[in-house]
Each structure stands twice: as C-alpha cells, then as structure tokens.
Amino acid sequence: MTKTKAQIARIVAGLRDIHIKTDRDRAIRNELELLFSYGEDDQLTHHPVRFTGGTETHGITFIEGSGGGKTTAILKVLRDFEPLALNPETGAPRWLFSKVESPATLRSLGVSILQRLGVDRVSDRAKVYEIWEMVRVKLKTSGISLLWLDEAHDLFKDTVTAETNDMFKMLKSMMQGDHPVVLVLSGTERLEAMTGIDAQVNRRFVKIKPQPLAYGTDNGRIEVVVRKFAEKAELESDISGEIVARLIRASRFRFGRCIELTIRAIHTALMDGADALRIEHFQVAFAEIESADVTKNIFISPDWQLIELADDDDAKALELQASARNPNKKKKVA
C-alpha cells in the first residue's frame, strides 16, 4: 500500500532513532567504568579515579573515520551511564558535550564550552587564561565530571605550532587541579596522530579505534541489519550476497554510513510504493548522496571494486579497498 509523505517521514524518523549496540558501545562503557570510582555501597560514583598519586584523571580518545557512527555511540553510552546521568543539584547531567569548531583556537574553544555551561557572553577583552579559569570554575560549580570534545582533531593544526603546544597544556590542565574532569576526545585518525606527538597527553588517554567493516566477516551481520530495518518499514528485503558487499564498499567500510545509506534506500523504496527493498533503491540513494553517474555508481558498475571514493581520513579503508582490488592478496581478519 502506498504511503503518504507524512507516513514515510515518520517511518524514516523512527529508523533514525534506532541505535544498534556494537562492540564500540561495550568498549566505551567498559573504559568509563575504569575511570570512575566505586563508593562504599559498591556502586559506581561520579567521582573520577585519580591517577599518578591522586594528582590527575585520565580520559578516552575515540578514533574513527567520518561517518563511522562514533558520535552516536558515545552519546548513547553517556546517556545510559547512570553515575553521570543526573546531578540532583542542577537537574542536568554530570557530563558536558562540546563540538570543536574549525578552525579552533584556545579562545574559541573556551568560549564555546562556557556557552554550553550557560555563559551567554564573554568579554572580547578577556584574556585566554581568564576564559579557561572561568571554564574550570563553571565545570566545578555545575558538578561536571566528564567533558566530551567531539571533532577533536580540529583542536590541532597540521603541523606542531605554539598553538598546538598550548592545546596540549590545556588538555593536561583540565585533568589536574582541585576539580579535574575525565576527558573524552572523539575524532578522525588525525586526532590519534596529533595526540601521539605529546607523550604526556598520549599516556593519559586510552584509545578506542573500531575496526572498519570487512568483506565476508561482516556481510552476514549487515544483511540482518538491512532486513530488520526493511521490516520496520513494512518492506521485504532482496538485499544479500554481492549487494551487501557493494553496500559495505559504498559506505567506505563504515558502519554508520552503512546505516545512513540503508535508511535513504528505504526512503526511496517507500516513495516508489515498492513492496521490497531492492538494489535499484540503493542505486538511487547512492547517486543522490555522491552525485555519481552510472559509471561511478557502486551499485551499478560491474567494476564496482575499482571505483575510487574519497576516504582521505581513513587509511584502513584505503587498505581494504586495495585488498579488494587484488584478490590474491591475503586480507587480515579483524
């Protein structure tokens, strides 16, 4: 039965609200449990564990290419992490999210965090150290125990500069003092490369780096996900075999992009009044997202494994692409 645009919009919105738990969720949760202390009742508290003789906290860096789903995963885990879920004194969570805007400076980052903490305006004459002192005070008075900086790769320039060194000092200072917080940094591979430059910063962070999807290893799981999503939209699914491999490649081997492309294909199928999700719906969805002509469409071209896609922030994806081109090359299974 053909659905109205409003009905289709509600179905798609429902699909976007679905969160599929993966190993990354468990990894984030496990690391959080190690970074917060237990109370006398054997329950986790919002108090960070102090390391190095009780002088500092530690943090997490979550490294994944664009579109992998890292932001959604961290957000879901933090919302469900009871020790930080609610500060009864403020009625707000004990964690704070701030997205790093590019280009980032110490001033712009500090002002952005203050805005998230309810400070509407910071004087243009305020010095950088004054802004960051205000950040520390507001984090303390707001009862914030964890600060999450998303797109954290934009904290750093491509080369080591005085500003980069100042960023490193800022990160270390946030994890020290009378109210140190747990820091979560999420970003692309460039974040890993830059934080690795400073040994003192690097040792304070545990690294979570999900493996990209792989042909064969993940085909069955992705096929099930596509079928479940199609069922939610009251569609059959004709997606299996090589089509799943094409979907993995079109998604740059990234789980988050795989879900996004599937939802867009389902939208196309619903708009067409189809009774099943088929490859032609992925052909249209991919063409819309990538502005790709027929010869460059992963779901049309017989030489789909040879098509170049922009993966400049995910070296692993390029490695997998190279392996796909050379069937004689032995591929590692994560």
Image: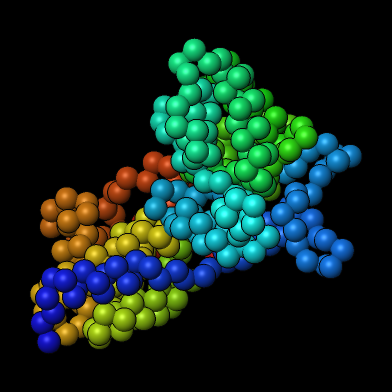
| Residue at image coords 10%, 82% | 2
Residue 308 appearing in the image: yes
Residue 160 appearing in the image: no
305 displayed left or right of 65: left
Q: How is the image coloured?
A: rainbow
| Residue at image coords 42%, 62% | 255
Q: How many marks?
A: 0
Does 202 appear above or below 318?
A: above
Give x and y (percent) for residue 205: 68, 43
294 displayed left or right of 311: left
Give x and y (percent) for residue 232: 31, 81
| Residue at image coords 32%, 62% | 260
Give x and y (percent) for residue 333: 55, 65
Does 286 appear above or below 207?
A: below
73 displayed left or right of 273: right
Q: Quadrant of residue 131?
A: top right
Viewer-closest of 316 and 130: 130
Viewer-closest of 62 and 126: 126
Viewer-closest of 285 and 263: 263
Does 81 appear above or below 151?
A: below
Q: Where the C terminus falls, by quadrant?
A: bottom right
Residue at the farthest top position: 125
Viewer-closest of 64 and 302: 64
| Residue at image coords 83%, 67% | 42
Q: Where the N terminus falls, by quadrant?
A: bottom left
Give x and y (percent) for residue 171: 64, 32
Q: Quadrant of residue 161?
A: top right
